[in-house]
């Protein structure tokens, strides 16, 4: 399973380098979207589907905004020379982030080994041991989502709702009223 993470990190690194180096602005925007999609796949493999869904929704909304802005201004290419120093710094930063990803992946436990089994005071242990006592809910999942992690759940729902509203506003027609009515 760790090989999949390395492949995804390599994919994200290649997309980041292409996004920095390409002269076609639309290709750079698409590469940035590929980086976000790779990140959401990593979240899925780490068994965090709620974060993966949020990442995909935000990434899609961001891509819609960037692609519309790029196409609306007819800016599909970058003209002029790029500074060598800026390009080198960008590639070094991307490489450092890539290496940090390797370090994080190496520090993870074996895939499938629950962290709460190795940590004495893990949040999950508290949920299991004191969930009924603290919340009074007989369903432990509901008590976690609605009591212990209510703000987190509210934040995720707000991000998803905002993304849907934003996409709806961006994709609608300019105006449904005729120009005479607007005057």
Image (cartoon, rainbow, N blue to C red):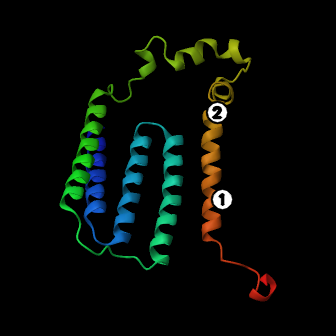
Q: Total number of numbered labels?
A: 2
Q: Is residue 67 left or right of residue 32?
A: right
Q: Position of residue 120 (x, y in %)?
A: 45, 11
Q: Position of residue 53 (x, y in %)?
A: 52, 48
Q: Secondary structure at mark 1?
A: helix
Camera-side residue of 160 and 116: 160
Q: Residue pushed farthest bottom?
A: 180
Q: Is residue 73 above or below residue 100?
A: below
Dot 1: few (<14), some (14–19), or many (≥20) neighbours within 10 Å? few
Q: Residue at x 48, y 45 (%)?
A: 52
Camera-side residue of 47 and 58: 58
Q: Residue at x 63, y 26 (%)?
A: 144
Query: Quarter of the image containing the C terminus?
Result: bottom right
* Cα distance between the residues tagged 2 and 1: 21 Å
Q: Position of residue 180 (x, y in %)?
A: 79, 88
Camera-side residue of 14 and 7: 14
The residue labelled by disc 1 is 165
Q: Secondary structure at mark 2?
A: helix
Q: Is residue 46 left or right of residue 11?
A: right
Q: Residue at x 30, y 43 (%)?
A: 4
Q: Residue at x 53, y 47 (%)?
A: 54
Q: Position of residue 79 (x, y in %)?
A: 29, 75
Query: Quarter of the image containing the N terminus?
Result: top left
Q: Is residue 93 above or below residue 119?
A: below
* Earlier sequence position, callout 2 versus callout 1: 2
The residue labelled by disc 2 is 151
Q: Is residue 134 above or below residue 98?
A: above
């Amino acid at each position: 399973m760790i090989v999949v993470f390395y492949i995804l990190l390599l994919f994200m690194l290649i997309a980041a380098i292409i996004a920095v180096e390409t002269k076609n602005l639309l290709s750079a925007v698409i590469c940035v979207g590929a980086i976000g999609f790779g990140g959401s796949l990593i979240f899925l493999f780490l068994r965090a589907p709620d974060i993966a869904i949020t990442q995909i929704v935000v990434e899609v909304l961001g891509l819609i905004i960037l692609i519309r802005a790029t196409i609306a201004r007819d800016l599909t290419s970058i003209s002029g020379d790029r500074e060598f120093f800026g390009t080198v710094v960008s590639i070094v930063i991307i490489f450092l982030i890539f290496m940090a990803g390797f370090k994080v992946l190496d520090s993870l436990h074996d895939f499938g080994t629950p962290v709460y089994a190795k940590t004495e005071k893990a949040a999950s242990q508290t949920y299991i041991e004191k969930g009924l006592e603290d919340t009074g809910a007989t369903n432990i999942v509901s008590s976690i989502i609605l009591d212990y992690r209510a703000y987190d759940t509210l934040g995720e729902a707000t991000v998803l709702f905002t993304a849907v509203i934003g996409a709806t506003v961006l994709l609608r027609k300019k105006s449904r009223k005729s120009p005479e009515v607007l005057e």
